[in-house]
Protein backbone atom coordinates (compact mmCIF):
# COMPACT_ATOMS: atom_id res chain seq x y z
CA UNK A 1 0.00 0.00 0.00
CA UNK A 2 1.32 3.42 -0.78
CA UNK A 3 1.82 6.80 0.73
CA UNK A 4 0.46 9.63 -1.35
CA UNK A 5 1.26 13.12 -0.10
CA UNK A 6 2.69 14.99 2.81
CA UNK A 7 1.80 18.57 3.48
CA UNK A 8 2.58 20.86 6.36
CA UNK A 9 0.47 23.87 7.30
CA UNK A 10 1.70 26.62 9.60
CA UNK A 11 -0.33 28.14 12.37
CA UNK A 12 -1.82 30.87 10.18
CA UNK A 13 -2.99 28.41 7.59
CA UNK A 14 -0.28 28.92 5.01
CA UNK A 15 1.28 25.94 3.34
CA UNK A 16 4.96 25.47 4.12
CA UNK A 17 5.61 22.15 2.46
CA UNK A 18 3.95 19.79 0.05
CA UNK A 19 5.60 16.68 -1.24
CA UNK A 20 4.46 13.62 -3.14
CA UNK A 21 5.61 10.47 -1.38
CA UNK A 22 4.94 7.81 -3.93
CA UNK A 23 4.14 7.06 -7.55
CA UNK A 24 0.39 6.83 -7.01
CA UNK A 25 0.10 10.41 -5.78
CA UNK A 26 -2.06 12.56 -8.06
CA UNK A 27 -0.33 15.56 -9.56
CA UNK A 28 -1.56 18.76 -7.96
CA UNK A 29 -0.45 22.24 -9.01
CA UNK A 30 1.08 24.72 -6.59
CA UNK A 31 -1.93 27.04 -6.50
CA UNK A 32 -4.21 24.14 -5.79
CA UNK A 33 -1.92 23.06 -2.97
CA UNK A 34 -2.15 26.46 -1.38
CA UNK A 35 -5.89 26.25 -1.59
CA UNK A 36 -5.95 22.77 -0.09
CA UNK A 37 -3.69 23.87 2.74
CA UNK A 38 -5.82 26.80 3.80
CA UNK A 39 -9.08 24.91 3.34
CA UNK A 40 -7.82 22.14 5.54
CA UNK A 41 -6.65 24.63 8.15
CA UNK A 42 -10.13 26.11 8.50
CA UNK A 43 -11.96 22.81 8.35
CA UNK A 44 -9.69 21.42 11.04
CA UNK A 45 -10.98 24.01 13.45
CA UNK A 46 -14.57 23.87 12.24
CA UNK A 47 -14.72 20.14 12.86
CA UNK A 48 -14.02 20.63 16.53
CA UNK A 49 -16.53 23.47 16.69
CA UNK A 50 -19.30 21.54 14.97
CA UNK A 51 -19.03 18.46 17.11
CA UNK A 52 -21.85 17.94 19.63
CA UNK A 53 -19.36 16.98 22.31
CA UNK A 54 -16.22 18.90 22.96
CA UNK A 55 -13.10 18.09 24.92
CA UNK A 56 -12.42 20.19 28.02
CA UNK A 57 -10.78 23.44 26.97
CA UNK A 58 -10.93 22.18 23.40
CA UNK A 59 -7.48 20.70 23.86
CA UNK A 60 -6.71 17.11 23.10
CA UNK A 61 -4.41 14.81 25.01
CA UNK A 62 -1.16 16.25 23.76
CA UNK A 63 -2.12 19.79 24.66
CA UNK A 64 -2.83 20.89 21.12
CA UNK A 65 -6.15 22.31 19.91
CA UNK A 66 -8.66 19.66 19.01
CA UNK A 67 -9.49 19.20 15.36
CA UNK A 68 -9.54 16.71 12.55
CA UNK A 69 -7.29 13.75 13.30
CA UNK A 70 -8.27 11.40 10.55
CA UNK A 71 -10.43 11.38 7.45
CA UNK A 72 -11.36 8.14 5.77
CA UNK A 73 -12.62 8.05 2.25
CA UNK A 74 -13.25 5.34 -0.29
CA UNK A 75 -9.80 5.52 -1.84
CA UNK A 76 -7.76 7.53 0.63
CA UNK A 77 -6.96 7.90 4.28
CA UNK A 78 -5.71 11.21 5.62
CA UNK A 79 -4.09 11.68 9.02
CA UNK A 80 -3.23 14.93 10.70
CA UNK A 81 -0.98 15.69 13.63
CA UNK A 82 -1.39 19.11 15.19
CA UNK A 83 1.36 20.26 17.48
CA UNK A 84 1.02 22.61 20.41
CA UNK A 85 2.55 25.37 18.34
CA UNK A 86 -0.23 25.10 15.79
CA UNK A 87 1.68 23.38 12.98
CA UNK A 88 -0.27 20.66 11.21
CA UNK A 89 1.46 17.71 9.62
CA UNK A 90 -0.89 15.99 7.21
CA UNK A 91 -0.19 12.76 5.41
CA UNK A 92 -2.39 10.98 2.90
CA UNK A 93 -2.11 7.36 1.90
CA UNK A 94 -4.02 4.56 0.27
CA UNK A 95 -6.27 2.63 2.64
CA UNK A 96 -4.55 -0.22 4.38
CA UNK A 97 -1.19 1.47 4.69
CA UNK A 98 0.20 0.53 8.10
CA UNK A 99 2.12 2.68 10.56
CA UNK A 100 0.69 6.02 9.51
CA UNK A 101 0.71 7.44 13.04
CA UNK A 102 4.31 6.41 13.61
CA UNK A 103 5.40 7.91 10.32
CA UNK A 104 3.67 11.16 11.16
CA UNK A 105 5.44 11.36 14.52
CA UNK A 106 8.77 10.59 12.88
CA UNK A 107 8.22 13.36 10.38
CA UNK A 108 7.57 15.74 13.25
CA UNK A 109 10.86 14.68 14.81
CA UNK A 110 12.62 15.17 11.48
CA UNK A 111 11.07 18.62 11.18
CA UNK A 112 12.39 19.66 14.56
CA UNK A 113 15.80 18.18 13.85
CA UNK A 114 16.36 19.35 10.29
CA UNK A 115 14.24 22.42 9.79
CA UNK A 116 14.01 24.03 13.21
CA UNK A 117 17.66 23.59 14.07
CA UNK A 118 18.70 25.05 10.74
CA UNK A 119 19.93 28.55 11.64
CA UNK A 120 18.79 29.96 8.32
CA UNK A 121 15.28 28.64 8.49
CA UNK A 122 12.65 31.22 9.32
CA UNK A 123 9.70 29.98 11.30
CA UNK A 124 6.38 29.67 9.49
CA UNK A 125 8.09 30.15 6.14
CA UNK A 126 8.18 27.49 3.40
CA UNK A 127 10.70 24.80 4.19
CA UNK A 128 13.64 24.77 1.78
CA UNK A 129 15.94 22.43 3.65
CA UNK A 130 17.34 19.64 1.53
CA UNK A 131 18.27 17.74 4.66
CA UNK A 132 14.63 17.61 5.72
CA UNK A 133 13.27 16.48 2.37
CA UNK A 134 15.98 13.87 1.96
CA UNK A 135 15.32 12.52 5.43
CA UNK A 136 11.61 12.32 4.71
CA UNK A 137 12.27 10.41 1.51
CA UNK A 138 14.57 8.04 3.32
CA UNK A 139 12.01 7.50 6.04
CA UNK A 140 9.31 6.63 3.53
CA UNK A 141 11.65 4.23 1.76
CA UNK A 142 12.51 2.55 5.03
CA UNK A 143 8.88 2.20 6.01
CA UNK A 144 7.84 0.80 2.69
CA UNK A 145 10.55 -1.80 2.72
CA UNK A 146 10.62 -2.87 6.30
CA UNK A 147 8.41 -1.02 8.72
CA UNK A 148 9.50 1.39 11.39
CA UNK A 149 9.56 0.89 15.15
CA UNK A 150 7.45 3.18 17.27
CA UNK A 151 9.53 5.72 19.11
CA UNK B 1 -19.53 3.72 23.01
CA UNK B 2 -22.34 6.13 22.30
CA UNK B 3 -24.16 7.72 19.45
CA UNK B 4 -24.38 11.43 20.08
CA UNK B 5 -26.48 12.81 17.29
CA UNK B 6 -27.88 12.14 13.87
CA UNK B 7 -28.56 14.75 11.18
CA UNK B 8 -30.05 14.40 7.74
CA UNK B 9 -29.50 17.20 5.19
CA UNK B 10 -30.88 17.65 1.74
CA UNK B 11 -28.90 18.72 -1.29
CA UNK B 12 -29.17 22.39 -0.51
CA UNK B 13 -28.12 22.13 3.10
CA UNK B 14 -31.50 22.33 4.72
CA UNK B 15 -31.87 20.09 7.74
CA UNK B 16 -34.49 17.44 7.13
CA UNK B 17 -34.16 15.60 10.39
CA UNK B 18 -32.04 15.96 13.50
CA UNK B 19 -31.92 14.11 16.76
CA UNK B 20 -29.72 14.21 19.82
CA UNK B 21 -29.15 11.03 21.72
CA UNK B 22 -26.98 12.34 24.50
CA UNK B 23 -27.08 15.79 25.93
CA UNK B 24 -24.79 17.47 28.37
CA UNK B 25 -25.44 20.60 30.40
CA UNK B 26 -23.68 22.76 27.86
CA UNK B 27 -25.97 21.56 25.12
CA UNK B 28 -29.15 22.16 27.04
CA UNK B 29 -28.07 25.77 27.40
CA UNK B 30 -27.72 26.14 23.65
CA UNK B 31 -30.85 27.53 22.16
CA UNK B 32 -32.37 26.48 18.88
CA UNK B 33 -30.61 29.17 16.91
CA UNK B 34 -27.20 28.05 18.03
CA UNK B 35 -28.08 24.49 17.19
CA UNK B 36 -29.21 25.55 13.74
CA UNK B 37 -25.90 27.35 13.29
CA UNK B 38 -24.07 24.26 14.36
CA UNK B 39 -25.94 22.20 11.81
CA UNK B 40 -25.06 24.66 9.09
CA UNK B 41 -21.44 24.32 10.11
CA UNK B 42 -21.69 20.57 9.83
CA UNK B 43 -23.20 20.74 6.38
CA UNK B 44 -20.62 23.25 5.18
CA UNK B 45 -17.84 21.14 6.58
CA UNK B 46 -19.12 17.99 4.86
CA UNK B 47 -19.44 19.85 1.59
CA UNK B 48 -15.93 21.32 1.66
CA UNK B 49 -14.30 18.18 2.95
CA UNK B 50 -15.76 16.16 0.15
CA UNK B 51 -14.16 18.46 -2.39
CA UNK B 52 -10.87 18.33 -0.54
CA UNK B 53 -10.85 14.56 -0.36
CA UNK B 54 -11.86 14.38 -3.99
CA UNK B 55 -8.89 16.41 -5.13
CA UNK B 56 -6.43 14.42 -3.01
CA UNK B 57 -7.65 10.97 -3.98
CA UNK B 58 -5.57 9.19 -6.62
CA UNK B 59 -7.02 8.20 -9.98
CA UNK B 60 -9.17 5.17 -9.86
CA UNK B 61 -9.99 5.52 -6.20
CA UNK B 62 -13.54 6.22 -5.18
CA UNK B 63 -14.01 9.77 -3.98
CA UNK B 64 -16.69 9.06 -1.45
CA UNK B 65 -15.99 10.33 2.07
CA UNK B 66 -16.83 8.01 4.91
CA UNK B 67 -15.74 9.35 8.26
CA UNK B 68 -14.05 12.28 9.95
CA UNK B 69 -12.42 11.75 13.30
CA UNK B 70 -11.52 14.42 15.82
CA UNK B 71 -10.31 14.05 19.36
CA UNK B 72 -13.83 14.37 20.72
CA UNK B 73 -15.70 12.02 18.42
CA UNK B 74 -16.21 10.64 14.96
CA UNK B 75 -18.58 11.82 12.28
CA UNK B 76 -19.75 9.13 9.90
CA UNK B 77 -21.37 10.30 6.70
CA UNK B 78 -23.27 8.75 3.89
CA UNK B 79 -24.35 10.57 0.78
CA UNK B 80 -26.90 9.41 -1.75
CA UNK B 81 -26.86 10.22 -5.44
CA UNK B 82 -29.72 12.64 -4.94
CA UNK B 83 -27.55 14.66 -2.57
CA UNK B 84 -29.18 13.60 0.67
CA UNK B 85 -26.59 13.39 3.41
CA UNK B 86 -26.84 11.44 6.64
CA UNK B 87 -24.37 12.43 9.35
CA UNK B 88 -23.97 10.36 12.47
CA UNK B 89 -21.86 11.49 15.42
CA UNK B 90 -20.40 8.83 17.66
CA UNK B 91 -17.51 8.80 20.03
CA UNK B 92 -14.24 7.14 19.17
CA UNK B 93 -13.60 3.42 19.63
CA UNK B 94 -16.99 1.91 18.91
CA UNK B 95 -17.62 -1.60 20.17
CA UNK B 96 -18.13 -3.88 17.22
CA UNK B 97 -20.24 -6.95 17.56
CA UNK B 98 -18.13 -9.92 16.46
CA UNK B 99 -16.49 -11.39 19.50
CA UNK B 100 -12.76 -11.62 19.08
CA UNK B 101 -12.76 -9.58 15.89
CA UNK B 102 -9.42 -7.86 15.74
CA UNK B 103 -9.88 -6.23 12.36
CA UNK B 104 -10.89 -2.86 13.77
CA UNK B 105 -10.04 -0.87 10.68
CA UNK B 106 -11.94 -2.12 7.71
CA UNK B 107 -14.83 -3.95 9.28
CA UNK B 108 -15.94 -1.10 11.50
CA UNK B 109 -15.77 1.31 8.59
CA UNK B 110 -17.89 -0.83 6.29
CA UNK B 111 -20.29 -1.68 9.05
CA UNK B 112 -21.08 2.00 9.66
CA UNK B 113 -21.49 2.58 5.95
CA UNK B 114 -23.81 -0.41 5.74
CA UNK B 115 -25.82 0.85 8.71
CA UNK B 116 -26.18 4.34 7.25
CA UNK B 117 -27.14 2.90 3.91
CA UNK B 118 -29.76 0.77 5.60
CA UNK B 119 -31.05 3.82 7.43
CA UNK B 120 -31.53 5.56 4.13
CA UNK B 121 -32.92 2.80 1.98
CA UNK B 122 -34.99 0.84 4.45
CA UNK B 123 -36.09 3.49 6.91
CA UNK B 124 -36.01 6.92 5.25
CA UNK B 125 -37.29 5.82 1.86
CA UNK B 126 -39.86 3.46 3.30
CA UNK B 127 -41.27 5.74 5.97
CA UNK B 128 -40.80 9.22 4.63
CA UNK B 129 -40.49 9.23 0.87
CA UNK B 130 -43.21 6.69 0.38
CA UNK B 131 -45.57 8.41 2.78
CA UNK B 132 -48.65 9.68 0.91
CA UNK B 133 -48.23 13.08 2.56
CA UNK B 134 -44.62 13.51 1.41
CA UNK B 135 -43.74 16.94 0.02
CA UNK B 136 -40.02 17.19 -0.65
CA UNK B 137 -39.94 21.00 -0.83
CA UNK B 138 -41.79 21.55 2.37
CA UNK B 139 -40.43 19.39 5.10
CA UNK B 140 -40.89 20.78 8.57
CA UNK B 141 -38.10 20.16 10.97
CA UNK B 142 -38.66 20.11 14.66
CA UNK B 143 -38.38 22.57 16.38
CA UNK B 144 -40.65 24.95 14.47
CA UNK B 145 -38.86 27.58 12.50
CA UNK B 146 -41.07 30.45 13.52
CA UNK B 147 -43.37 30.36 10.56
CA UNK B 148 -46.94 30.84 11.73
CA UNK B 149 -48.68 29.42 8.72
CA UNK B 150 -48.07 25.73 8.99
CA UNK B 151 -50.57 24.75 6.35
CA UNK B 152 -49.20 22.42 3.76
CA UNK B 153 -46.01 21.48 5.56
CA UNK B 154 -45.05 17.87 5.78
CA UNK B 155 -44.12 16.90 9.29
CA UNK B 156 -41.74 14.01 9.72
CA UNK B 157 -43.42 13.30 13.00
CA UNK B 158 -46.50 12.16 11.11
CA UNK B 159 -44.59 9.15 9.86
CA UNK B 160 -43.10 6.49 12.06
CA UNK B 161 -39.61 7.33 10.84
CA UNK B 162 -38.27 8.30 14.22
CA UNK B 163 -39.61 5.22 15.96
CA UNK B 164 -38.16 2.89 13.40
CA UNK B 165 -34.87 4.75 13.40
CA UNK B 166 -34.59 4.51 17.17
CA UNK B 167 -35.42 0.83 17.07
CA UNK B 168 -32.80 0.22 14.41
CA UNK B 169 -30.11 2.13 16.23
CA UNK B 170 -30.90 0.41 19.51
CA UNK B 171 -30.34 -2.91 17.82
CA UNK B 172 -26.82 -1.92 16.81
CA UNK B 173 -24.07 -3.19 19.12
CA UNK B 174 -22.32 0.14 19.04
CA UNK B 175 -25.27 2.12 20.28
CA UNK B 176 -24.62 2.75 23.96
Image (tube, rainbow, N blue to C red):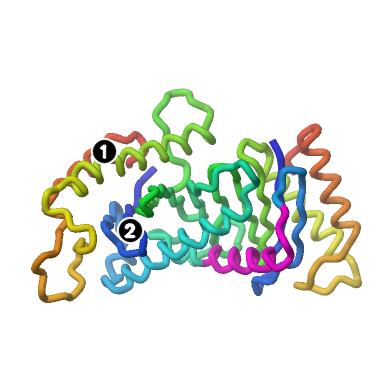
Q: Is residue B49 left or right of residue B141?
A: right
Asked if B53 appears above or below B165 in the picture, the reply is below
Q: Nearer the viewer, residue A130 or A86?
A: A130
- Residue A85 in percent (x, y) is at 68, 68
Question: Which chain is home to disc 1?
Answer: B
For the record, the magenta segment spans A27-45
Could you tell me if residue B64 is visible in this image?
yes
Q: Name the residue located 31 percent from the left edge and 69 percent from the top edge.
A: B36
Residue bearing mark 2: B10
SS for dot 2:
loop
Quadrant of image for the C terminus of chain A: top right
SS for dot 1:
helix
Residue bearing mark 1: B122
Q: Is residue B133 left or right of residue B48?
A: left
Q: Is residue A33 magenta?
A: yes
* Labels 1, 2: one chain: yes
Considering only order in the chain, which callout, 2 or 1, is on the residue closer to the N terminus? Answer: 2
CA gap, disc 1 and disc 2: 18 Å
- Residue B143 in percent (x, y) is at 20, 66
- Residue A8 in percent (x, y) is at 71, 61
Q: Name the residue located 36 percent from the left edge and 38 percent from the top edge.
A: B115
- Residue B23 in percent (x, y) is at 30, 58
Could you tell me if residue B90 is visible in this image?
no
Asked if B59 appears above or below B55 in the picture, the reply is above
Quadrant of image for the N terminus of chain A: top right
Badge number at residue B142: none
Amino acid sequence: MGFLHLFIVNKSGGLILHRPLGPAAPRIGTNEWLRIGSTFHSLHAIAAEASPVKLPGNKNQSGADDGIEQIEGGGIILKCLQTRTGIKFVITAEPGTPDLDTVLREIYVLYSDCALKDPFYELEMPIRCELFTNSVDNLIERVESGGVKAR
Amino acid sequence: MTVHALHIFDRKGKTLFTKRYTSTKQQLLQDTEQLAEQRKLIFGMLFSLRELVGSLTPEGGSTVMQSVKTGAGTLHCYETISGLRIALYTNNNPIMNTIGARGGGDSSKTSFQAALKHMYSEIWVECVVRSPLYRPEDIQVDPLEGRDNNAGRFDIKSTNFEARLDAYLASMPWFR
